[in-house]
Image (cartoon, rainbow, N blue to C red):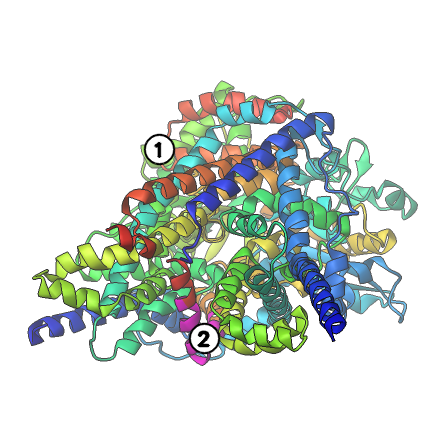
């Protein structure tokens, strides 16, 4: 590559990055504008005055403390379930021989391709029968049942790549399959667990349709639902709305920076899984 | 080797799935009941693997989970109920304050306020079907029929009202009647919000246009006078253009025009009369405000809602119901006033006056507490600062209301009582509304003619009203 | 001694057999949660939904068998066709564009310019925005009077647009919005690119292949399985677009963004037509199934698997 080409490329990428980041910049700056100033033409590219109080105002207008608590509760419990049960299933599919294993794994793959809406209505009816509507259970318990098809698939691929010598040796020593899973496989799996956890956290943080259908009480709403309620009450108050939106984006971005390594490795695993 | 899905495997899976479909299709002929049996619970596994899931959820969610709410009152003996309402910030503030007032005035019942996102009537039906509806909620007279006919979802308070000797005379007769459906009382009103024309005094003054009359039914304030006034107030260009008039795009705001012209969308027997010449004429008149007279922006131009145009002084007249007065009173820049809809060719004028009432959920575990709350919402102390106008005549005629702001004609709202008509009440309101709303929006955007809309809506809406939609 | 060895062998055999048996039991125990989930949350509901599709069911009263009424209804239902058309438009324009742009971005990010880490983060960040926040943000950006989109366009002296408020530009606006979140696909492509053995490129260069040819004959074939995977997942996701549409436009203007799942949701949870909604769900399932199968079928022609190396 010539220096000129390199320079042009650099310029082009900077331009792309600017275009991609501009909406986020717009969100954050709008969130810091005095109410009403968001309607100024030409717009204020730098808010003046900078109104930090939009954040406490937005967060106290609706009980965001509940929304955070519920979301964190769901994220933590559902992620724990996903990691535990999908690594178990992934381990079994990768390392244990049992009847109909191939067939069952085909089912895992088939459900990956299944549009969720097919089961939406009967699942709603099921949870209604169980009396679970207006509780967080429908948003947590299903993830204790194998997580997602994708997480099982990812786990199986990971365990397939672990050398067989390790568990053969343990088996000779009389270790049970559970022990092999818990004492040998899991300690080798931080990259897998990290990837599963991150995908799961993102999924549950973002999830909207499930909470929309299963939960309505203010005290049980999640952040996504809370943000939607916010839209209802503050329809034209974009300064506050953007403040509330920013609050839901920040934790994810923070997670990204904190766990970038896991993130990339997880994506790499998915990327390779595609081959 | 580890490609995502081998083709063979996938085809096998697909074949299985379609096989299952076939099986199901055959199976259902024998047994059409398809509700998953309640015995098929995954709770065994769920509980075994993670007892903490349930355990942590309950206490964290506090006293408001269904389980807790359905159980006995809290140890302290206070009954917990919920009250839900949607609306913009100013409306929500009103309802929140009403809840606080209720909690202050007595201590046996504690109500919590539940803000719902706007336009969520449909979701209420879902909640009712799921058995998780709020104990009490803000309702509208148009919706009562749907809630009752779809499985008796509203608490029948006829006996309670009789026992408590509610002073029926304090409510306008059409309003009182709408608390009922098929002879039973399902709601209790607190607020009436007549639709009126909000106008900008300063714009009128600047253009030297005489303001509209202060009383309903003025023969000089007819449709032509309205168009002339709007024309004189339309000026400028581009993003600074001022419109003489912005309407509310929702079809229910057509009622006053249609009624005053001698037409109806649905007649008193529930039959569709949308193709009546008087009705069609009114729709056409309204469409022409943009199409021919250019005094009104198209619906698609009102990106931020018609209110935004009015509030930024870019519309001289604006139609809304008087819930909007809460917001209007907070506006600093707009010198606002209210005027009547123009008089129709019948020489009369009628108004749509939404009857905001509260209802209780039929399956509330605390029907008596819920009734106490409904009574509170309809009481004098809760309604004196109602969103539009208090439902109680005695409160609406009091100085508290008539002089709430010095420069506005609040008497106009009181006078809307006698010219009020009941809007269509159908058990299929949601579907009716969605269908007509989209079509009328097309007309207002100039993408459909009134004639086409009527031709298209007639068979559709007829079916919907018959329950065949 | 001899006896001992025979005994030992017998024990070993028995233990071996019991070990095998244990493995079978343990296997099933370990997949049990998933298996229960499959039966209770996937297979059962799918069957139930198939059965419901032939009923008239409003939740409040027991379902009534209605034969093929729902199918007939569908054929005459304009909104069903509208929602199908909208969704197809969104999918068949949006997904290829999405894949192409994500691939392009991945190629850019696979170069060795200074500050590549910053660029990667910048390109990836938008995809982290939760859908609800995303919808609100873009509702504001697309605001025809005060939104960023038109501000930028008018600064560049380009014609402005009504975006989500015009039925002709509403879906393109949604597609543009989805392109903004290209990050996750882009990263998978990037992972794939970094996995292409550099020797292949070197060999091709020695053979005199230019950059474009190398991309065409080396990179693309190596990446094709990932492209297939991403396309399939994106098509399935795109057919089910809901949250952003529900929040940003709720189907408007004039049903221009009434997407399939939004219409299904309305029927099931707003109009109480659970039977009809189930029929809609199954139709969607069949459509997705057919498209997935077609894509696998077509993939024979263009997807290259490492195992195929021997052949060619």
**Which residue is located at x 81 percent, y 47 percent?**
B363
The answer to whether any part of residue B298 appears in the image is no
**Which residue is located at x 25 percent, y 67 percent?**
C197
Give the secondary structure at mark 1.
loop
Kindly identify which residue carries mark 1.
Answer: B447
**Which residue is located at x 73 percent, y 65 percent?**
C10
Q: Could you say where residue A150 lies in the image, as x and y percent from the top left?
A: 51, 58
Kindly identify which residue carries mark 2.
Answer: A262
C310 lies left or right of C84: left
The residues colored magenta run A249-268
**Which residue is located at x 35 percent, y 37 percent?**
B290
Q: Main secondary structure of the magenta part?
A: helix
Give the secondary structure at mark 2.
helix
Kindly identify which chain the residue marked by label 1 belongs to: B
In this view, the residue farthest toward the front is C2
The answer to whether any part of residue A243 appears in the image is yes
């Amino acid at each position: 590559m010539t220096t000129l080409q390199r320079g042009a490329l650099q310029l082009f990428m900077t331009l792309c990055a600017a275009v991609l980041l501009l909406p986020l910049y717009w969100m954050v700056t709008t969130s810091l504008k005095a109410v009403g100033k968001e309607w100024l033409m030409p717009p204020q590219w730098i808010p003046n005055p900078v109104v930090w109080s939009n954040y406490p105002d937005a967060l106290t207008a609706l009980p965001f403390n509940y929304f955070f608590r519920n979301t964190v509760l769901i994220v933590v419990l559902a992620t724990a379930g996903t990691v535990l049960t999908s690594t178990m299933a992934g381990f079994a599919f990768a390392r244990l021989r049992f009847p109909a294993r191939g067939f069952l794994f085909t089912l895992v793959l088939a459900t990956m391709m299944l549009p969720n809406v097919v089961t939406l209505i009967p699942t709603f009816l099921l949870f209604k029968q169980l009396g679970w509507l207006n509780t967080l259970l429908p948003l947590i318990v299903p993830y204790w049942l194998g997580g997602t098809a994708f997480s099982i698939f990812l786990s199986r691929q990971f365990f397939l790549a672990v050398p067989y010598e390790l568990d053969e040796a343990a088996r000779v020593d009389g270790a049970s399959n559970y022990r092999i899973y818990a004492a040998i496989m899991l300690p080798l799996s931080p990259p897998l667990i990290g990837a599963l956890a991150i995908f799961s956290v993102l999924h549950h943080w973002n999830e909207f349709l499930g909470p929309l259908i299963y939960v309505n009480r203010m005290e049980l709403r999640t952040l996504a639902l809370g943000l939607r309620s916010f839209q209802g009450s503050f329809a034209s108050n974009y300064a506050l709305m953007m403040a509330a939106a920013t609050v839901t984006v920040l934790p994810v971005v923070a997670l990204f920076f904190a766990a970038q390594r896991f993130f990339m490795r997880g994506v790499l695993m998915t990327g390779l899984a595609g081959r | 080797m580890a490609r995502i899905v081998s083709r063979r495997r996938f085809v096998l899976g697909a074949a299985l799935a379609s096989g299952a479909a076939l099986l199901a299709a055959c199976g259902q002929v024998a047994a059409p009941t398809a509700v998953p049996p309640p015995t098929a619970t995954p709770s065994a596994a769920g509980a075994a693997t993670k007892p903490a899931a349930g355990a942590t959820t309950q206490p964290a969610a506090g006293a408001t989970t269904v389980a807790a709410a359905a159980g006995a009152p809290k140890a302290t003996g206070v009954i917990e109920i919920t009250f839900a309402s949607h609306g913009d910030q100013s409306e929500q503030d009103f309802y929140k304050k009403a809840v606080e007032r209720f909690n202050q005035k007595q201590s046996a019942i504690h109500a919590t306020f539940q803000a719902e996102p706007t336009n969520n009537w449909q979701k209420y039906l879902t909640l009712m079907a799921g058995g998780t509806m709020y104990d009490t909620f803000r309702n509208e007279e148009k919706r009562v029929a749907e809630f009752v006919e779809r499985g008796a979802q509203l608490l029948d308070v006829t006996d309670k009202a009789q026992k408590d000797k509610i002073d029926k005379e304090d409510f306008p007769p059409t309003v009182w009647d709408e608390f009922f459906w098929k002879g039973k009382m399902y709601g209790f009103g607190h607020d009436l919000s007549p639709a009126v024309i909000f106008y900008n005094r300063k714009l009128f003054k600047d253009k030297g246009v005489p303001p509209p009359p202060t009383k309903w039914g003025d023969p000089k304030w007819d449709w032509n006078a309205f168009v002339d006034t709007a024309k004189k107030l339309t000026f400028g260009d581009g993003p600074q253009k001022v419109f003489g008039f912005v309407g509310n795009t929702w079809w229910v705001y057509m009622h006053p025009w249609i009624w005053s012209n001698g037409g109806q969308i649905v007649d008193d027997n529930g039959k569709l009369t949308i193709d009546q010449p008087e009705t069609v004429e009114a729709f056409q008149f309204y469409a022409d405000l943009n199409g021919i007279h250019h005094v009104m922006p198209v619906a698609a131009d009102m990106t931020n809602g018609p209110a935004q145009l009015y509030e930024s002084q870019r519309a001289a007249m604006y139609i809304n119901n008087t819930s909007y007065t809460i917001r209007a009173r907070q506006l600093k820049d707009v010198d606002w006033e209210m005027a009547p809809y123009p008089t129709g060719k019948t020489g009369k004028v009628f108004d749509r006056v939404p009857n905001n009432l509260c209802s209780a959920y039929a399956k509330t575990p605390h029907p008596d507490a819920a009734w106490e709350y409904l009574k509170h919402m309809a009481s004098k102390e809760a309604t004196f600062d109602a969103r539009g106008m208090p439902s109680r005549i005695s409160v609406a005629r009091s100085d508290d209301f008539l002089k709430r702001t010095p420069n506005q004609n609040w008497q106009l709202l009181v006078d809307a009582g006698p010219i009020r008509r009941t809007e269509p009440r159908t058990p299929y309101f949601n579907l009716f509304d969605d269908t007509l709303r989209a079509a009328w929006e097309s007309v207002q955007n100039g993408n459909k003619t009134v004639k086409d809309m009527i031709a298209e809506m007639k068979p559709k809406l007829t079916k919907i009203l018959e329950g065949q939609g | 001694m001899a006896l001992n060895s025979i005994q030992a062998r017998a024990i070993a055999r028995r233990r071996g057999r019991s070990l095998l048996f244990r493995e079978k039991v343990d296997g099933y125990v370990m997949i049990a949660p998933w298996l229960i989930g499959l039966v209770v949350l996937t297979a059962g509901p799918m069957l139930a939904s198939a059965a419901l599709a032939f009923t008239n069911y409003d939740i409040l009263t027991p379902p009534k068998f209605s034969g093929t009424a729902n199918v007939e209804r569908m054929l005459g239902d304009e909104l069903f066709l509208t929602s199908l058309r909208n969704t197809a438009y969104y999918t068949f324009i949006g997904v290829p564009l999405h894949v192409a742009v994500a691939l392009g971005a991945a190629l850019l990010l696979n170069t060795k310019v200074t500050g590549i880490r910053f660029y990667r983060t910048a390109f990836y960040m938008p995809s982290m925005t939760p859908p609800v926040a995303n919808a609100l943000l873009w509702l504001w950006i697309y605001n025809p009077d005060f939104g960023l989109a038109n501000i930028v366009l008018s600064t560049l002296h380009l014609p402005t647009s009504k975006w989500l408020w015009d039925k002709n530009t509403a879906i393109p606006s949604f597609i543009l919005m989805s392109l903004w979140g290209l990050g996750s696909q882009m990263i998978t492509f990037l992972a794939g690119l970094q996995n292409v053995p550099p020797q292949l490129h070197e060999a091709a260069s020695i053979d005199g292949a230019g950059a474009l040819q190398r991309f065409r004959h080396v990179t693309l074939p190596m990446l094709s399985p990932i492209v297939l995977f991403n396309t399939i997942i994106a098509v399935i996701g795109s057919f089910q677009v809901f949250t952003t549409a529900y929040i940003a436009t709720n189907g408007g203007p004039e049903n221009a963004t009434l997407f399939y799942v939004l219409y299904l949701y309305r029927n099931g949870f707003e109009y109480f037509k659970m039977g009809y909604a189930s029929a809609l769900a199954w139709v969607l399932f069949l459509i997705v199934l057919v498209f997935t199968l077609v894509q696998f079928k077509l993939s024979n022609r263009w997807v290259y698997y490492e195992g195929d190396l021997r052949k060619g």
